[in-house]
Amino acid sequence: MSKNNNPEEDYFTRVEREKKERLKQKLDAEAAEQALSDRKELHWNRCGKCGGQMHPKVFKGVEIDICEDCGAVLLDPGELEELAGADEGGVISTIGELFRFSRRK
């Protein structure tokens, strides 16, 4: 409460404070969304190794992305398993487990 103990004034002060807080939260959320969108646009279809442009290429029936500058290969989720086939307990599934583990936070 304020020093003058006026309930009506306290009410309107609280309402204004809550409005400002909601507006701040909304603006913060919009700014975070815009930052994510900007970052995605900046890095979209770029190599994580050298920043070169990635180009799709069909390899064994699977569309993979290859960097035109350094030759790095990018596999989308599930493409490693699709290329390797049924390799339960083998090297490929171990590598796949490593990538699945690295995405967890």
Image (cartoon, rainbow, N blue to C red):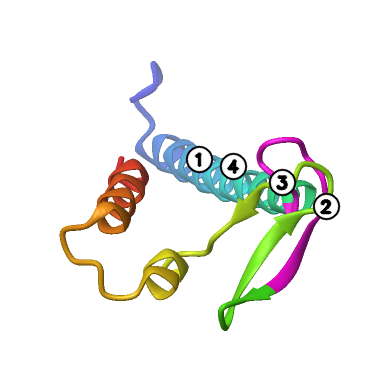
Residue 56: which quarter of the image?
A: bottom right
Q: Mark 1 near mark 4, Cβ–Cβ under 8 Å?
A: no
Q: Is residue 93 above or below residue 58?
A: above
Q: Hey, what amino acid is under mark 3?
A: Cys
Badge 2 marks a residue whose secondary structure is: loop
Relative to residue 27, is residue 46 drawn left or right? right
Q: Which residues are magenta?
A: 44-57
Relative to residue 11, is residue 54 drawn left or right? right
Q: Residue at x 77, y 41 (%)?
A: 70
Q: Residue at x 59, y 42 (%)?
A: 28
Which disc number belongs to residue 28?
4
Q: Position of residue 90 (x, y in %)?
A: 22, 57
Residue 103 versus residue 7: which sits nearer the camera? 103
Badge 3 marks a residue whose secondary structure is: loop
The first of marks 1 and 3 along the sequence is 1
Give yes or no for residue 46 being in the magenta stretch. Answer: yes
Which disc number belongs to residue 68?
2
Badge 4 marks a residue whose secondary structure is: helix
Which disc number belongs to residue 21?
1
Residue bearing the label numbered 3: 47
